[in-house]
Image: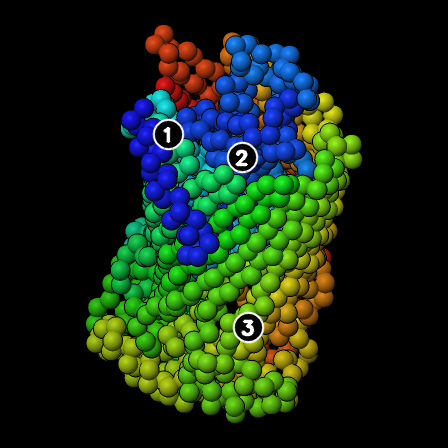
Amino acid sequence: MRQKDRRTGFARSISAIALCTALVVARPAYAANDTGTIQGHVTGAPAGAKVIATDAVTGQRVTSTINASGNYIFVGMRPSTYRVQLENGAPQDITLPVGQTATLDINTGTAPGGSSTGTKGGEIVVKGVRARNEVRTAEVATNVSQLQINTLPQNDRNFLNFAALAPGVAVSTNPSSKQIQAGGVSSDNVNVYIDGESFKNQNGHGGVAGQSFSQGNPFPQSAVQEFKVDTQNFKAEYDQAGSAIINAVTKTGGTSFHGDAFGEFMPKSFFGRDKLGRAGHPNNPDGSIPKPDYKRWQYGADLGGPIIKDVLHFFVAYEGTTQQNPAQNVTFTSPFIPASVVAAGQGQFADPFKQDLWFGKLTLFASDKDTFNLSVFDRSESNHTDYGGTSVQSHGHDLRVTTRQYLLQYNHRGDRWLNEFSVSYQKQRTGTPNLTDGPEIDLVTGGILVDDNGHAILGGNGQFQPQTGNTAVGIGGTVAQLGANSFQQDSRQKFLTFKDNITFFGDGHVIKAGIKFNHAKFAREESYFADGAYFFNAADFQNGTCTATPACQPVGAQIATQPPRSASATDNQLGIFIQDDWTVNDHLTVNYGLRWDYESNMFNYNFVTPANIVTALNNYPGWKAAGINPADYISTGKNRKPYLKAFQPRLGVSYDWNGDRDIVIFAGAGRYYDRNLFTTGQIETLTDTVRSDTQIVFGGKCGANQSVNVPQFDPSFYDVETLRGIAASCNQGGSVWLLPNKTKVPYTDQFDFGIRKRFGKIQTAITFAHNESRHIFAYQRGNRLPDGSYTSQGDRWVEDNFPAEGQLPGFNGKLNIGAFTGKAHYDAIYLTVNKDYNEQDGWGFTLSGTLADAKSNAAIEQGSDEFFSGPDMRQFGWQNVAGIDKYRLVATGIVRLPWDVKFSATGTFASGPSFGSVKFPANPPENASAVVNLGGVYWPKYPFAYKNLDLRLEKKFKMPWGHELTMDAEVFNVFDTLNRAYSAWGAGNGTPAPRIENSFTGNPPARSFQVGLKYSF
């Protein structure tokens, strides 16, 4: 009793403060609906009677009051199972999924105006209950339950894999790049919320922080209770997403102790080798390449329970992965490479991956009206890779990802309102540090020489030997890469975010408003030839070292003229929204809202174009002839303004035909702004002020400036700063990348309409979706010949080495200029058929089908910054979006078998993605090489180019002391299907294009097995 008094007193003391916070101080971060609503109608109870909902896990009690119409409502409820009852009445259980509205109608057996027909000692007895998930909504959403997460087969414990159960959503099958794509645009347009906080990658590509080139998982699956995928018409509280959002909620410690410990194992013998690499197949015709090593352990544990029962609870989870990926093969094919180098560097080398994920959460139920959550999340991973082929192991990278987040949430509940406040700090880092330090060592054969007439010739016999009368101006082809890698990158983002949302409810309305503030810091560093690279004649190089003998001296080098430094920016992000869910009557429901977003420094607004570039642009004859105004690209640090018009109206309407939730017609429309990526904008800063590498030939010329002579090699040139000084004396700039001063923000206008129909326990829906995306950004070629043309034969050419007459004065390289002219439209039909699993029936299934027509005028690959095939990304016209399926069907099933055995399956069948074309016409212009269209030019040869079926079987054993042991076995790609990868450079390469290539995709790529064990208490 004393404990309850303390909690009630606490509520009284802070309720006024909470209300002031909601109305005055409100400063939120990324608003996300990670809660749900329980509502219903009570027959036979008077207005003012109390309805109580008790969380079956945490024991938290929430009270609502029946209004004059006989309705009650609970908003902002944690997803869980609740016991709902009238005060002093019999409880009834109802399950509330994340982001959903669950309806529970109660009939007390009392006729209106009469007396109860079912009372006992003055207690109201519930006579009938009807519980169901809400279908009166315009949102197109898919809920993924904890049962599905725990029971359906999956290879790598990434909870985001189950996003593929939603129509219009595809999960990457590339094991080294776990990304989610939806709505006919790239993965960059997705946003993931965990406990209401955004895990958006605002720095680089991939959509989700840490997933740009990682094979790891963004969060421990054992800590995820459930999640929801919204593919169309999500509400105004959501931001920074142009395609789809994923909304996950974590577990909370309950009133009793519960925990799990698990391990999953896939040894080399269980891992299937792809068909193309098996003996007698295209990638291993003579069978000389052995099956690569592979082994993976996935393991972890979680524990939750009370510290002070009903007051302070905890939950902790850990998951780890130790994985030996298929070994990388280093193979030298040039006959000029010394035997000593072959012996030291050739062979199979391990590709290890290690990840650790930690999550901890404290929950304080300060009163029936006040709840605090404090959570900590930590992610750390390492992957040694990027070697193989002609690159030795020391030339590789350690792909590292680290994420840490601290989150404090406070919710206060009033009689007809709810305030939700949170503050969080998140830092995320992705980088590729080298496995070894020092310069890169490249072994070359031949060299580019210029004879007395200025014609290029090639030195032969594996030697770089300038002949009498010839001048060395370039380096020959590389046949082996030793030493350290010449490129490293590091991306960082830090967020200090506040959010406060307040919800008012009553009389058919649930009005929610919020404001966010996010203080963001970004940094990007690229080390490109910072430690230099030395080029040696392959035939003369010995043991990877060099002496003073002329035969072992490098013939050339490449180095950045400046040491690396970070490009950084601070960006203050502000967002405001208001929305109303209005239940007009038993038939009509309207959801409408408005959102506005602002960022102070989204896209390199403070950059100042260097003076030498300004001078060169103003004196560039090609731009003058083409009518390109340099002022449109020269930044003073003040002429790029933040975008102020990001207003986003959103509207949804649903109509329940009979008022019984059997047939529901719905429609929605809205505008959804995303954002430009920091790294994309910082290419301008890094290229124009930091990355300026120069290739030199000792005793010859500067590769970038043929008027400057380079001295003969001297051992002092092994000093990095000495070599940098020689390169700087070349006095020639490299590539120049420029953003337009009138920057724009990408957005998508979404429209949809559909119908839902229930057949007994089976819920079906068909949706027609249409999206229009605008302001797709890419850098495109800005080089022009003196007459203003791109080449003498038109625009559709790849030209990386522009002729001298088309170079920007004083520079030698690509001149790229940014454009926001890309557009996309997406038409799709979504079909879903679901039957929830329950223990009474013993079976359940889901079916999700997508038929899509995705088109774009931007001929670029998804997640790309550069259109390198000409001066205009629109030059190939409207065509299919590369990388997106035409049709996709995903089906799952769970069945309870005798002896407490569960069997489950997931099948995916798709058209395969469209892909681009590469052609090499005869007689190309100037220095051009090919015509490359990276839009969706072709489709795979076969109607279902991707087919995969995974199975899982689990058996539970009850221990005599009440605990539980679960054994499971999984089979992935049951039919051992070869799922090929499709790219412009393979399947689209040539005339005619083969439309097939000898590369594969899939995770895993062939039939594989996994076994697991879990102990629960």
Instruction: Read off the residue under disc 3.
Output: 743
Instruction: Read off the residue under disc 2.
Output: 74
Give the mark toward the camera: 1 or 3: 1
Q: Residue at x 64, y 30 (%)?
A: 70
Q: Please identify the quadrant where the C terminus is shown.
A: top left
Q: Is residue 164 left or right of residue 537?
A: right
Residue 253 numbered mark, or none: 1
Q: Secondary structure at mark 1?
A: loop
- Asked if residue 516 can be seen in this view, the reply is yes
Q: Are marks 1 and 2 in contact (CB under 8 Å)?
A: no
Of pointers 3 and 2, the one earlier in the residue sequence: 2
Of pointers 1 and 2, the one earlier in the residue sequence: 2
Q: Is residue 17 left or right of residue 159?
A: left
Query: Which residue in the rendered view is the most extreme toward the right?
Result: 657
Q: Residue at x 61, y 59 (%)?
A: 648
The amino acid sitting under disc 2 is: Phe
| Separation of residues labelled 3 and 2 (CA atoms) | 44 Å
Q: Nearer the viewer, residue 173 or 654?
A: 654
